[in-house]
Amino acid sequence: MRILGPVELWDNADRVELRGSKLRTFLTALVLAHGRVVSDQTLVEMLWEDAPPATAQAQIQTYASRLRGLLGDGAVVDRHRPGYRLHIEHADVDLTRFEGLAAEGRAALADRRVEAAARSLSGALALWRGEALTGVTDFLADLERPRLEEARLAVLEDRVEADLALGRHAGLVPELTAVVTAHPLRERSRAQLMLALYRCGRNADALASFQDYRRFLADELGIDPSAELQDLQQAILSDRHTLLAPSASTSRPAPAPPVTRLPAPPADFTGRDAAVDRARTLLADAGAPRVCAITGMGGVGKTALALRVAHQVADAYPDGQIHVDLQGSSRPLEAAEALTRLLRTLGAPAADLPHGAEELTRYYRDRLAGRRVLIVLDDAAGERQIRPLLPGVPGCGVLLTGRTRLAALEGADRISLQPFEPAEAVELLARHTCPERAAAEPRALPLIAERCGFLPLAIRACGARLVGHPHWPLSRLADRLADPHWLLDELRVADLDVQATLALGYRRLPADLRRALRLLSLLSTPEFSLWIASVLLDRPLTETRAQVEELVEAYLLEVPAERPDTYRFHRLVHAVARERALTEETPRLRAAAIRRVDLALTA
């Protein structure tokens, strides 16, 4: 249940429709009663004020019945004369969470645990989504909203106090200026604004704010500012250094020891010299926040390259190197979960972690301030998942991998990783094959590499296949890779599974793009023009272009450098898409798609 903003009812991640202001008012009145009985007469006043209909009691009974159906098992609406009472899990109400976090923050503030106080109080304020009680009747809003707004402002002032103690005065000036403009009588906010301005070196502005407040009080109420505020004015006039921001030594955690949480790169890492050198150059300078994004198709070796580079630049990040698998290809981590993992690795106690992604991000960046840490974000789902995880502070670097081009990620340097060069692929295969075996069939290893499309994961699978079958002639594997019926089976060895890896990218696509990829794989050649794709998909050219470009963005299609007006499948992506087409499309639909192309070509 959410009332700190538009009134909403939620069932886990699903919003429950509350139709009509009176139903929202009935539910909100019960929630605000905190388990006490709300009388019929009070409900009538809240719903209809001075003009209740003759059927008011019957309508209230109807509202109660409707709420029982909407609330399900998590809450109970009881008839308890002379009214109704709601039993609900308090954790399910944003107001209850707000009050709990506010109490935690104030207790921490009283103990001078100002960083913990700032986190809890910020978490409380983050629960507000606008003006409270939006969508209820005017009677209930006018009755309860002032109390809730006063509670919000009091928590805001407490959080500002904690932020001032932490030396965050520069960021507070715009926020406090807005507060005193909207609420000119709040003297505590005025004092906080004056103090923040003074600490920013804006003494004249601090004194001008005091004069504005004194004139306002004289004009509106005929009184002077309090003695406390006048003392603050005198302290600013005297330029007392006791007003400066206190040392953070009493409020910030002790420096954490270096932490290293990097998996080892593959022991047989091969080639990629240009990509390694470029990534190392980008990340070697830890003076400014740097973000290096390695993108490419599934199985192309993004993680191997990232780990190789991370270990090589580790000396530039003496405070630690951390790896987090964002699981973007399967079940992407929410930003809050990823931040929690990062913070726990950085040594933050679980009890100190704030609530919500925004506050977790703020705490994460505060904890990284002044440190030189390399963050490896592996298998990112997209820009929205990544942005809250960027340190954004000098001294820290980010090395991330993903299956999309991450074109909207601001300030990132990108490395679009392609399959191996032929020589690199043959070199990796040779590491799994004894020299005598390779010398007996000198053309076999290049042929195997080619039929793998030079994809590193496929090369590794073939290497494992050769190790497991030392009696096979190399040509036998090459021949099986040439057969579409055996290709994907041969590239599945233990936990090396090319089909499963590429299918992850396929499953992430929206339904219309999955269908487009399936149908395009039915063409007799892996390379095609936009016009042919339009005919095959039976879509206008503009719509077809949008779809194939999205598939390029997801590294499931390629644009040949020598023919930029065409599109092309990687050999193994083509095999996986064809297998999906044969499984998921009916023979009649497949035949109809091919017939459209044949008719267009012979027209």
Image (spheres, grey):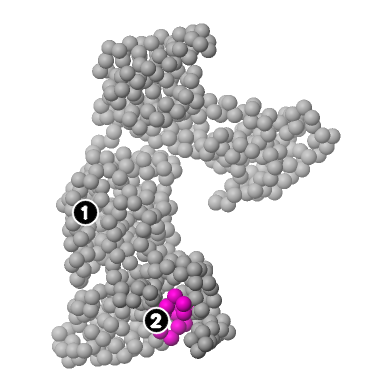
**What residue type is disc 2 on?**
Pro
Across and down, in percent, residue 390 comes to 33, 49
Across and down, in percent, residue 303 comes to 29, 64
The residue carrying pointer 2 sits among few (fewer than 14), some (14 to 19) or many (20 or more) residues within 10 Å by Cα, namely: some
Above or below residue 414? Residue 124 is above
Q: Is residue 442 left or right of residue 512?
A: left
Q: Is residue 456 left or right of residue 111?
A: left
Q: Compare marks 1 and 2 and give the one earlier in the sequence.
A: 1
Q: Which residue is mark 1?
A: 283
Nearer-the-camera pick, 458 or 203 = 203
At mark 2, the secondary structure is loop
Point out the residue furthest to the right here.
54
The reply to whether the magenta stretch includes residue 520 is yes
In which quarter of the view is residue 262 placed? bottom left
Q: Residue at x 18, y 50 (%)?
A: 285
Residue 526, numbered circle: 2
**What residue type is disc 1 on?**
Leu
Q: Identify the magenta region.
A: 519-532
Nearer-the-camera pick, 396 or 598 = 598
In which quarter of the view is residue 19 placed? top right
> What quarter of the picture does the N terminus occupy?
top right
At mark 1, the secondary structure is helix
Across and down, in percent, residue 100 comes to 49, 33
Across and down, in percent, residue 74 comes to 61, 46
The residue carrying pointer 1 sits among few (fewer than 14), some (14 to 19) or many (20 or more) residues within 10 Å by Cα, namely: many
The reply to whether the magenta stretch includes residue 20 is no
Mark 1 → mark 2, Cα distance in angstroms: 38 Å
Q: Is residue 480 visible?
A: yes
Above or below residue 213? Residue 342 is below
Mark 1 vs mark 2: give the one in front: 2
